[in-house]
Amino acid sequence: MKNTLIPDFKALSVAGAVAAAMLLSGNATAATTIDSVSSNFTLGKPVTHPLGVQPSSWYNSAFGDMGWTHFSKWGKVTLQAGRTYQITLVSGDKKMHPGVSVWYRYTGAAYAPVNYVTNHSYLQFGSLEAKNQIDETTQKNVKTIKLEAVINGFDKDRDPATTDAADANPKKNVAFPSMASFNGVSDGVPGTLVMKFKAMKTGTYQFVYGATSPDDNAATAKVAATATTPEVPAGFNHNSKRIPVTVTIKQVAK
């Protein structure tokens, strides 16, 4: 288990470092909604968002090593302080590796509704407090978005059978994030990520999940998309394949 509260800006790309610094200092002002890509979770009940996730949605080296807000999927669940929980992500394609970031989300009269996040990109690790957030559509002040980092990580197990007859360059693996703060997890099961954490407070926990570093990028990006999204990351388009990722959160023994 690994909690990463402060990012190592020296290891981030320039674009990512600037964006991360703005978020963590509270200087970001534009808030975006995640209603179309978010789900409510019940303990022990698996959820598979109908839109799926795209390759490199949780981590994209072409965008300052950050995640893409609307290409990823979001969830929230109420947890109890002092209890231990396990979050499990299973990709529908072993060549696509899920990643997740979990935060305690501050709620109440002084804070923005949970369906708001700070930007169209996000830093996968670290806490943030962004005050006076403005809805990018209505220009209404939605107050403060405050997230306290709990845990983050990604599946780092390659599928040994990363071949594709239609691809001239089979096993064209995309590099995994090299920075330790991203927290690669190897358990011998490609396409699956299992992490445990202890809830330090009772309340709302928000998480974002997506994918990183597919084993065979061409093979995971051929099928036409079933829906559109607000932005297109460099190197991808709306025809990028979306892979179902099933997420389960449950209480476990310590």
Image (spheres, rainbow, N blue to C red):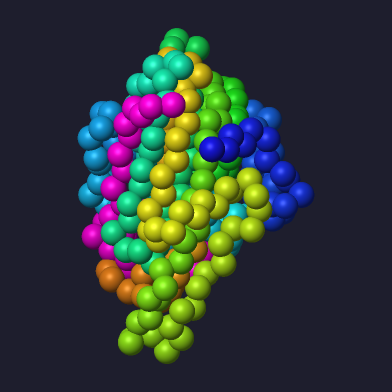
Q: Is residue 61 shown above or below 83?
A: below
User: Going 60% across and 55% down the picture, which residue do you hit?
Assistant: 65
**Residue 163 belongs to the span the image colors magenta:** no
Magenta highlight: main SS: loop
Q: Is residue 52 shown above or below 207?
A: below
**Magenta span:** 225-254
Q: Which quadrant is the C terminus positioned in?
A: top left
**Residue 226 belongs to the span the image colors magenta:** yes
**x and y, in percent, of residue 229 in the image:** 35, 53
Could you tell whether 73 is left or right of 158 in the image?
left
Q: Nearer the viewer, residue 115 or 99?
A: 99
**x and y, in percent, of residue 81 in the image:** 44, 16
User: Going 28% across and 55% down the picture, which residue do you hit?
Assistant: 244
User: Going 46% across and 79% down the picture, which residue do you hit?
Assistant: 171
Q: Is residue 64 shown above or below 133?
A: below
Q: Quadrant of residue 97?
A: bottom left
Q: Nearer the viewer, residue 6 or 153?
A: 153
Could you tell whether 86 is left or right of 244 in the image?
right
**x and y, in percent, of residue 202 in the image:** 43, 15
Could you tell whether 41 is left or right of 190 in the image?
left
Whether residue 15 is visible: no
